[in-house]
Image (cartoon, coloured by chain):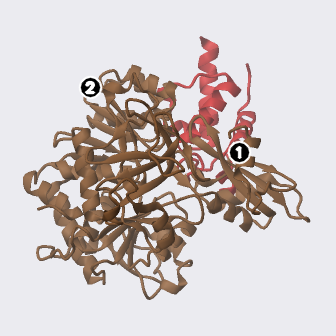
Amino acid sequence: MKVDIEAVEESIIRFILATFPRAHQKGLDSGTLLLENGVVDSIGVLELVEFLENQFRIAVTDEDLTADNFRTVAQIGAFVLTKQCIGDAV
Amino acid sequence: MDYLIHHLLRTSAAHYPEKEALVYREQRLSYASVERAAKSLAVGLSKAGLRRGDRIGIWLEPSTEQALSIFAASYANAAFVPINHLLYPQQAAHIIHDCRMKGIITTMPRLNRVAHLLPDLRDEIFAVVTDAGESPPSPIKTLAFDHLCQEDGSKQKDQCLGRDLGIILYTSGSTGKPKGVMLAHDQVLAGAAIVSEYLEITDEERILALLPFSFDAGLNQLMTAFCQGATLVMMDFVFAREIVQALAQERITGLAGVPTLWSLLAQPQSGLYKARLPSLRYITNTGGKLPRNVLYTLQKVLPSTKIFLMYGLTEAFRSTYLPPDELDRHPTSIGKAIPNTEISLINDQGERCKPGEIGELIHRGPTVALGYWGYPDLTAKVFRQNPFGAPEMLDGEKVCYSGDLATMDEEGFLYIVGRRDAMIKSSGFRISPTEVEEIIFQSGKVRSAAVVGVPDKVLGQSIKAFVVAKDDEAPDPAAIIDFCAANLPRHMVPKSLEYLSELPLTSSGKVDYLALKKREGIA
C-alpha cells in the first residue's frame, strides 16, 4: 500500500484535534510538541496507539513507545510509514 | 517520641543517615541530607514570615524539592497544602485564597500564571521558587528555594502538638469548589503506621511514587517510606513502559496505583508481561474498582507479587484493604477495615445494615480528619457522633460518613455499589459536577448545564455534559469542550456533550441528575 506522508499527517492531526481538546489551544501543526505541552498524556497515548493501529494497519509494540516516535505529528507520521514498510516486507 | 510529621524523617535520619531516602532522576538523597535540607528550608521559611499554624502551599511537579518542602513545612511548625501540579491557575488560586495561604513553594512559570488572580494577596503572601534565575520579577515577594536551603537549621525548635493541623488536602465533593480536608499530625502518623503494618513495609522497601502527594494515597506512600526508613523513588512518565523500566532498574518492591494506571500497565505495549521483576513484592490499587480483566492480567504477569485492593477517602485517609490471599474468592471486594479501624454500614433508618443490605459506609478510627477548612455545616454533616456509641459519650468522638454506598457479605467483606450524591470519580480524581458546570457557563454559550459521570473502561468514569443553548446561540459542542479544555485540567474536561431543549428538573426545581443518568442507561 502506498501512502504519502502528508495524507498520514493530516489524518493524525484530524484525530488529535477531535480527541484532545487541548490541541486547539496549542495551534496544532506537524511540529507541535505533543508530549511536553501536555496535549497528549499517558492515557492519550493509548487512544492514539489504538487509532494508529486501526487506521494504518500497523502493530505498535512496546519498543515503539518512545518519546522519539511520538513527540510531534511529523515524528508519528514517519514512524507510521516506517512501520508500514516493515510490514510490507514481511 | 514521634508525634509530628517531620519526626518520621528525624528518626529515620538517626537510624539510617546514609541510606537513600529520595531518588528522582539522577538525584539520590540520603536521609541525613534530606533532614539537613528540610531543616534549613524551615529556617528560611520562618525568616520569610511563616509562623506556627500558617498554611504553606506546595505547587510543584514530582521532585525532591516537593518532598523536602513537605517536611520543611512541618519543621517550621506550619501546615502544608499540596496542590496537584496538573491544576490550572484558576483552581490553584481558589485553594490559595480559601486557606489564606501565607506562602507558596512553586516554579516561576506557575507563579507568573497565577499572580494576576491574586491581586488582593500581593502584600500578604510570599513565594519560594525552585527555578529562580533570569525570570522577570513577580509582583509577589519571591525567594529562591536553593538560597533558603543554605540557612543554619540546627536550632529549629518544635512548637506544635500532634493534634495541630499538619496538612490540608483539597478534594472535591458533590457540589461547589474543592474543600480543604484538615489532617492533624497524629492522624498522618497513624495512617503511616497502620499502612506499614498491613503492607508489611520495612526499611528494605524501595517504593515507586507515581500518585501525587496531593492525593491521600500518594502522600501516604511518602509517609510510610519515611516512617520505616525505606527508599522512595519518584518519577514522571508518559509511556507505561517507562514505569516498567523504572520498576526493573530501581528494583522497586512496592507500587501503588489507581485503576487507570493499572489499565495502562496491563496493555501489551507496556512490556510488563515480559519484564522480569523479582523485586516487586506488592502492588496496591485504590481510587476505584479495578476492572476484572485488568486484575486478571496483573495476576498472570506478576505471579509472585502480592496484590492489595484498597479503599480510602481523603476525609478518613485510608479505610479498608483486601488481604491478597482473599483475592481469588472476593475479587470485587474492597476487603475489611484496616488495623485499629472500624467500618460499619448504616441504612436510612440509622440501623446497622444486615448482610447484603445497601448502606452508607462509616469509618471510625485514628485517621478520621478534623473536618473541612472553613465549612462548619459540611463538617457537621460528614463528621458526626458515633451512631453506635453509648449515648452518654455524646459527641466525644467523630466518625466519618463517607457518602459511599456499600454492602457487606456474611463474612464481613465489603463491596462498594455507588455514591449517595452526584460526585464523579474519574481516573482516581474526585470531581464535583458544579465545578465543571461553572466553567461551561463561563463559555457564555449555554442557558443551563449539568454533567454526570458515565462508565469508561480506562478512566472508571468520564464526564458527559448536557446543555441547553442560549436562544441566540447555534449549538457548537466543540467550542464548549474547547473552552473547558482551556480552563480545566484534562481529567475535568467533558468527553462528550449533548444538547437538550430543557434539563429535567426535580419537584423542588433542581436539576434531576438521576433522570440524566437514566437517559444514559446507568441508573
Tell me if residue B384 comes above or below residue B161 in the rendering.
above
Badge nearest the viewer, 2 or 1: 1
Tell me if residue B46 comes above or below residue B109 in the rendering.
below
Q: Quadrant of the N terminus of chain B?
A: bottom left
| Marker count (numbered) | 2
Q: Where is residue B139 in the image (x, y as percent from the top left)?
A: 48, 84
Viewer-proximal residue, B229 or B17?
A: B229
Label 1 sits on a secondary structure element that is helix
Asked if labels 1 and 2 touch by Cβ distance under 8 angstroms, the answer is no
What label does residue B517 carry, if any? Answer: 1
Q: Which chain is represented by red in the image?
A: A
Label 2 sits on a secondary structure element that is loop
Residue at image coords 53%, 40%: B358
What label does residue B278 carry, if any? Answer: 2
Residue at image coords 21%, 38%: B200
Q: Are marks 2 and 1 on the same chain?
A: yes
Q: Colour of chain B?
A: brown
Residue at image coords 15%, 73%: B153
- Asked whether the viewer can see residue B428, the reply is yes
Q: Which amino acid does label 2 sit on?
A: Pro
Residue at image coords 36%, 73%: B56
Tell me if residue A69 comes above or below residue B62 in the rendering.
above
N-terminal-most mark, 2 or 1: 2
Viewer-proximal residue, B108 or B348?
A: B348
